[in-house]
Image (cartoon, rainbow, N blue to C red):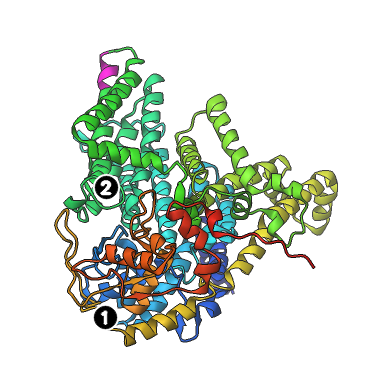
Amino acid sequence: MTDKINDVPDSNLRGSYIINFLYNKISIYTPLILFIFGISLYIRTVLPYDAVFRGGIVGFAADDAVFHMRLVENLLHNFPHRIWYEVFTLYPTGQTLHFGPLWTYMIAITSLILGAGSPTLELTRTVGAYFPGIIGALIVFPIYFIGRDVFDKRVGLLAAFMVAVMPGQILSRSIMGFSDHHAGEVFFSALFLMFFIMAVKSVKGKDISLNDIQNKNWNKLKPHVIISIFAGITFGLYMLQWSSGVFFGGIVAIFIVLQYIIDHMRGRSVEGLCMVSFITFLSAFPLVVFFVDPLNRFSAGRYSYLHILITLGSAIFFLALGLLSIKMREKNIDKIYYPLTIAGIYALGLIIAKLFVPQIFSSFQRFFSIFQPHTGGGLTIAEASPPTHQMIFGYASYPNNFGGSYPGIFEFVSTYYIALLAMVAIGALLIFRKWEPEKAMFLIWCITMFALTTAQNRWFYYYSVNVAILSAFIGIGILDIAGLKDISSRFRTLVSTPRSLQEFFTSDLPRHLLTALVVAIVIMVVFLPNFTIASRSTADGTIGSDYYLWHESLTWMRYNTPDPGLDFDAIYDRPPAGETFQYPDTAYGVMSWWDYGHVITYFGHRIPNANPFQAGIGGGTNHAPGASTFFTAQSEEAAGEVLWNLGVNNKSGSRYIISNAYMAYAILDVMGIWDGHDWTDYRTWAVISG
């Protein structure tokens, strides 16, 4: 009898041990964030599935997405080598590519794994279609951790939920079929900021000295070094996702220099931040240096010496600033000379670059141009135009989009204004209450991304994650004011029986009703509109109404027009500096509007004269030959002259012309703007009465 009694506690102890282990190791937030990931994945892959996989072909977004698949399929033919110079576009010159390699390799390697080394074309295109949806769904994880480390777990969780269901640019660029690299940009940039904020927070208030490295005190430094290395690796991966991602190094550099100055002026050591900054940027260097092409010189849009300067150069610079602070403190030099010295170094660097290395100076000038709106024809690029009122509130979760059932006053509680309020609140907390480096880094990131959206609406897909975290910060703050912060702990303490449950609710009824009301408002304003809009907007996938018509026409063209005499699956070397590709006499161009250049390459295996890289458009004040001057030519003779001026080797630059009704009735005025005309020259207004 005694043995049997003793057996029961042993079993219970084992069960209790497992339960306690799971309770201690797996937070309630773990299943919640996984559930949020599931919702995000459902919206991005399940809802658009029927729209993407129909008609026997995969419905990719028709611009850059199809060109990415061109790169993937070519990579699989030539693995591990990828195209860097494309001869199947921009006839008669060809074009150097700026697309980062990571997205291409991720899709190709996944296809190789799933295809056991020999993936079919169908499998490859299926993987390519799924990829943006999966990567887009994964964004919730770094957003959760950023929200957690800057504020708390509740903010992180709410932010993750918001970004999972948020409509607009972040959603349209991260759903199945939109196989461009934009989802990867947001994911890896957020991952980089996540690790960097973790690294900065890990050294805050810690007694870390550069002497610890000399003394080989690895146990003390190990966690900080590892996180910093991960930050650097993800920064490198982000730049391999998008070559112009070097600008994110500038955002982080602003914070680092500012934090250096604040720490030095307050008499605090900068050595912890110095170590984090040095390791982060140094760790990114090996990933990008392999892809640097000397022919690109200091280009910000292609892998160049600028990428070495931003990674290795910045690492050395931050180390030097850290050592400068240490030496100035040791010699008791007046603190004010530290920021003055930094300003002097910056000014001297600009002067030297301007006088002796103008390419570097021009690169920095081009960096600031991203804060400026386009002009002329550039304004007609949908994603590059300044945001309109509808864009702002559509992309920032404008409640009126929820069936039009909310009054206009709800515009002022949209996440757009909530995010602005949050930035002001965080700035005030940093200035008047307590300076916290992780919050400062987060705020600088948010302000920069917001500034970018004022010039070009494409930046909303970046800024959406900032909006989610900022809105979550305000939302949790409101819930705390309503009494939700301590309600769970009071519930566990006070409620043990049905009677105590009743007493719990009735003892402070007004407070509980207020809490319920606030929660209901948050759900009504944030969750329900977003989820409904997101579900509705993804159901039709990413393809345009004429996608299948273009596929049919260009497939016919591929098999019923002369072969251009080039191997579509081959890789061609980039010509020497100042030269263009020498096409065989059998090659020819296909004239169409630049929007359709990539589908001509991908579906037709032919060479467009213009493409969505905004190349080959021509026009401008000089009316350079190109797509805009051709389609707005006022006579057949003038159009023929444009094609002849495009040509080489005494032949026309185009052998075939592809147009559709849309070019005539919808975008002819756009073509005119690119060619330097007034758009009203191509519109006739008519008033039709009954």
- How crowded pointer 2 is (Cα within 10 Å; few <14, some 14-19, many 20+) is rated as many
Instruction: Write down the quadrant of residue 573 in the picture.
Output: bottom left
State the residue position of label 1: 117
Q: Nearer the viewer, residue 276 or 346?
A: 346
Name above or below for residue 213 compared with residue 344: below
Could you tell me which residue is drawn at 29 percent across and 21 percent down? 344
Q: At label 1, which amino acid type do we have? A: Gly
Secondary structure under badge 2?
loop
The answer to whether 115 appears left or right of 662 in the picture is left
Q: Nearer the viewer, residue 411 or 652?
A: 652
Q: What is the x, y in percent for residue 68?
A: 35, 68
State the residue position of label 2: 299
Name above or below for residue 63 compared with residue 409: below
Q: Nearer the viewer, residue 26 or 264?
A: 264
Q: Which residues are magenta?
A: 326-331
Could you tell me which residue is drawn at 31 percent across and 84 percent down? 561
- Of labels 1 and 2, earlier in sequence is 1
Residue 599's disc number: none
Does the magenta run of residues contain 395? no
Instruction: Write down the quadrant of residue 394 in the picture.
Output: bottom right
